[in-house]
Image: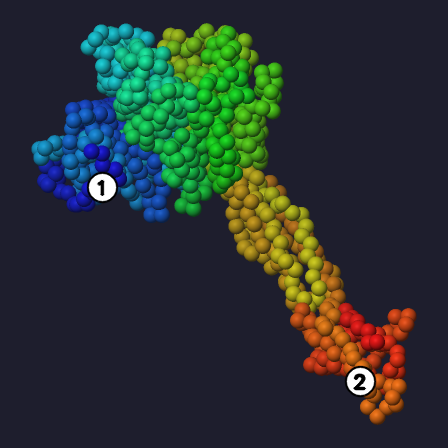
Amino acid sequence: MALRRREFLKWSGASLAGIGLSPRLLTPSSQSSGILSGSPSLSREQLFDPDFPFPFDDQYFACAERVFNVRATETGWRAGLSLILKPGKTLDLKILAAESKNGLATTKDVMTFYGVSERLETDLFAPDIPRLYYQVLYREGGGAWKALAPKSVKLPAALDKGGEIKVILISDDHTFDDADYPVASEHKAAKLNGDYVNVLLRELRTNPFLKPQTPLESLRNGLCLAHALRYIMANEDPDLIINLGDSTGIGANYKWAGLGLPTAGLTDKEYDEIARVLWLRMRKIYSGLTPYVPLLIAQGNHDGEENWTSARFRAAEWRKTLFPQPDNLTYPEGGHPDSLYFGLSLGSNRSYRGGARFIILHTTAFAGSHYPKTPEDWTLGEAQFRWFERVLKMGERDWVFACFHHVLGGWPAGSNEFEKSYSYGRGPLFTFEDYLGCANPALVEQVRLTDLGRENGLRAFFYGHDHIFHSKLIAGGAGGKDMLGVCCGATKYMGEAGWWKGEYWRRYYGPAEPPASRFWGPPGLTRLTIRKSETLIEYILSGYSPYTNVPQTSGAGTTLSTRRLVNPPPRLVIEQKELAFRATEGRGGPPPQTLRIKNDGGGALHFSLKSDAAWINLWPKRGESWGEWEEITVKALTRRLVEGSYRGKITVESDDPSGPAGEVSVRLTIDPFFNFPPRNFRGWKTDAAGGMSSEVDIHLAWSPNPLNKLVGGYRVWQLDAAGNLTKLGDVDEKTFVYTVKKLIRATSYRFAVAAVDRKGREGELAYTTVA
């Protein structure tokens, strides 16, 4: 039975005596001279600590704990925690949480779960602290409680308060390629289930130079990954690890036989079991890291959810079960409901502004029912593309990065250049110019992605697939933000020297031979050190291989390449240079207008506004922009103004260091007041009182026009045959009739009436004819 979230959850305080464990086991004090100083990460301690099973207790658990989906809440932090039990085991579990390692011994923050089998997913909560400590206790059948090593999870610091974010990018571990190396029967299970990587990691704990014994020594990709894991545990304390794909091998069915898996005539049940085994394998081989740092994957063409792979549905189910990732509801960036693509931000402030945004894309899930034949065939699919566009335009970040397994196009060849029947997504081809001579650039989706990135402040595309480290300046983006394309290397053992000799390869990546090398081969990983003002992109050697172009004198931990991205200073942009208003005196103000202001540089632009005219009203009068347009409502207050032309100025002051304050001129024209014509103007004749039979009185009547606001009275006119006006008289504002006496009965007359304001100004005329 799998428990999820807080099902059967019981909160309780727990003393050490009640748990049955000593303080030493909860917070081991054993240290080793091999532990590097300077970081509070407990992953270093576990490397050298003999008191706990490393990297997990494989008598009770199928793999180590995994923290995932760390995100901010209104009061602090929340993180998912996943436990996978060994098949057939049913355990009681306690999960302790505290703000320090020593605090685990006395914490009252304890979650208790009874009768757990298969797996458990729950949530850890923490206040606004830099690191959360937790520990898993377990027992079987009412026996004594045991403890896994205490763990800690780094909670990302805000960049705008001087914080620093560290992200490790790993790609193409290709441990499934170890299928190519035969081993004796007693080692086949370890090769298939990934145990051998943790055996290697245990051997490397205190001596990273130890040469493992055969047959493990021959499983070189797992050995190189173990070296990379050890390097990270001993030397880094990252906030996030992103795996750029080609890790599970579910999409590499040509390797299954070498792993001991069936390959021909497979049933759905067999696909299901293969997907389960290989996702659990990945979870197991990364067990040295998963308890301490969120590890996410941007799936590649060998991970099983390619749209042309028979196992894709089962692969997706087991990924969601064994390796949950963010979905469309986890972070404000959203994503796919089944976590095929998603976004997240690290280092933001409490208003979820600033920091670094990562956009994780899926290159193969929507690209058609077979491997794309040309660069033009590669696509994210309509929904993923529109989501990418929307997230890019969200702005409000110091840094924005996109991660995918390979470019959405590439040169027109297969995994080797002589293969022309399909397009493998190979190469650093990002721009319209890159595709000239390779494809129709107007039809390559990567060109559209790149253009969107340039327009919206994307700083880099990070990708794998080509098993090298290479960085390329794609273009200068908006606001002075350079955009890079970075192939992030591979932890695998062998560099593909045969690829490096190809025509396309040398054209786009350059030569491999030192000292003219323009890229570095494996094994290595990429480290991002992100600060508010800059991001350092470093390629770090993580192991050793003679089959590469890396200098043989370099050791693990050597930085082979450094690229620096600078966050430019804020830059004020005001969309309008002038605003013009027009109104009529006494008839209310004109409609408000919107003044748009944004930061076209880096970081946050803080600004304030003022005007030099009392009739200019601004709201709000201050604001900030992280790259998005901020809208200011501008109103012209005309109630006390008379007809005429007026001029004013809005001054926008900001922390843009490049120049003076911005100015917007404002023009206001107030037309002369006028009243609308009275309504229902009409007239009729009656016999003239006391007059001759040939004379009549003409009575005129009208209704007030409700649109008129400042009526002081009405003025009545008579028109002659030529249309000339003769004033007949004035009445007050409450009188709506007028009588003209002793006119000739047989004659037709034309009249007009106008509303007159309190200043004697006459409005528009209403006309009537009395026959």
Residue at 72% over, 73% down: 680
Colour scheme employed for the rendering of this structure: rainbow
Residue 685: mark in rendering: none
Residue 686: mark in rendering: 2
* Residue 199 in the image, given as x and y percentages of width and height: 23, 17
Whether residue 260 can be seen here? yes
* Residue 721 in the image, given as x and y percentages of width and height: 90, 72
* Residue 282 in the image, given as x and y percentages of width and height: 30, 22
- Could you tell me which quadrant the N terminus lies in? top left
The answer for how far apart the CA atoms under marks 1 and 2 are is 94 Å
Q: Residues within 10 Å of mark 1 (few under 14, many from 20)?
A: few
Q: Is residue 619 left or right of residue 56?
A: right
- In this figure, which residue is indicated by the disc labeled 1? 7
Residue type, label 1: Glu
In the image shown, does 746 or 3 lie closer to the viewer?
746
Residue at 71% over, 82% down: 735
